[in-house]
Amino acid sequence: MTRPCFSNRSHWLRPMCSLLCILLGCCAVPSALPQNLEKPIQSIDEEITAFAYAPDGRIVYSVYRKMKTKVYDALEHDDIWIQNAGGKRHRLLEGQKYTRGAQSFSYLIDSFRWSPNGHFILAQLLTTTVLDDTGKTEDSFQTLLLDDSGKEIHINKGDSVISDAANASWLPDNATIAYLSESVKPRLLFSLKFTRPAVGALPSFYEGRTFRDIAWLPGVNSAIAVEQDHNLTGPSRLQRLDLLSDNAKELATLEGYEGGASVSPSGKKVAYFIDKEILEIRDLTSLNRVARLRVGLGVFRWSPDESRILLKRSLEKKSGDLVWVDLPPLAPIPANHEIPISQPTPIPILHGLSFRDFAISPDGRSLAVVITGKRNLLVFPLPR
């Protein structure tokens, strides 16, 4: 079985050139304080496919593994591990022992999300299932439920997997899961669904409504969603959803939406790309306070004080360099007035090298990165 096209193998040319440029002093781009890449405060020398920080600083991560069967000699079955702050590790899931019925399948871990109490984990899997003896396959995504000891969490005493579940999140009760289910393929629109391991599927107050994306608000039963009608006509609308009722408030009509919706750590701001160049930031407590930045499409994380973002200048699961981008003040914009666009100067970190993935620790002190090529995970003090 060939490897599914979920992964990316980037070349080292760009990072090598960036490093030479810095060493020779020929780049006039401002940079953050230098980092010693030879001395990370933590490292995991495995081929990492996904990882996430727990609220207490532990790291759950998946390791790429291949397994052989009598029929297929290259099935992919990632392992799942946890590493604590002291570097001690234990395995939660041994991939080669993870099966789902009689059908052969491959899977890669795409992402993780922790429960607020740090005891439960949602692992999003990208799967390729062999349907018949001809070798016909089907790609899908699903979410696996685990606790932090590695025990699978079964839904209503049944399966431990939610099929067709993307971007799943535990609600503040640590007992209810909200997730997106594909409504218009391929991953164009989603419906919002709920389940609770104790009882199974729950009714959704937003049945029949479709969304392009959703960002879960921290610590409350609410989310910021980008809603789009099922026929993909008309503009996208930014909505605040109460997840435990049908109380939804329209926040803004968007000029466009390219992805990346993210709520700030305080829950007071939301940011998203309106096209492949422009990031829009909106104050959720004063909706007419908006800013736009020309930064180029990428993946970003908020700084702990929300004064800037750390941007990976590439798409999800692709390699790119990391830069700090200072955020301008959010200014009141009168109705029907054009929003000015600022062009901040990006500040490279970690010598301008490219990385596949990254995350800022919950305490805001550390930065974890997955390096290009070997895909090892390294943790550094967060560059200022």
Image (cartoon, helix red, strand yellow):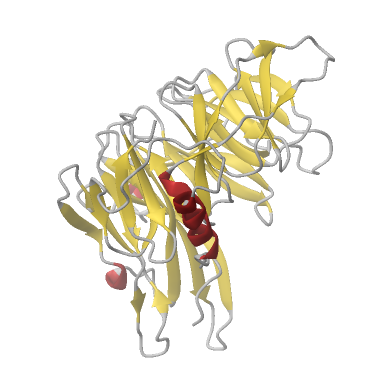
Residue 112, position in %: x, y? 39, 48
Looking at the image, residue 282 lies above or below residue 260? above
Question: Would residue 188 be seen by someone viewing this image from the given angle?
Answer: yes
- The one nearer the camera, 383 or 82, is 383
Q: Could you tell me which residue is drawn at 44 percent across and 72 percent down? A: 106
Residue closest to the eye, 31 or 118: 31
Q: Is residue 162 visible?
A: no
Number of marks drawn = 0
Q: Residue at x 53, y 38 (%)?
A: 300
| Residue displayed at 56% across by 67% down | 139
Question: Is residue 114 rendered to the left or right of residue 10?
Answer: left
**Residue 286, how many percent across, how many down?**
62, 10
**x%, y% of residue 166?**
52, 48
Location of residue 175 with respect to 131 vertically, above or below:
above
In the rendered image, residue 289, in percent from the top left (x then y), is placed at 66, 13
* Residue 332, placed above or below residue 383: above
**Is residue 34 shown above or below 279?**
below
Quadrant in which the C terminus is drawn: top left
Identify the residue at image location x=43%, y=64%: 108
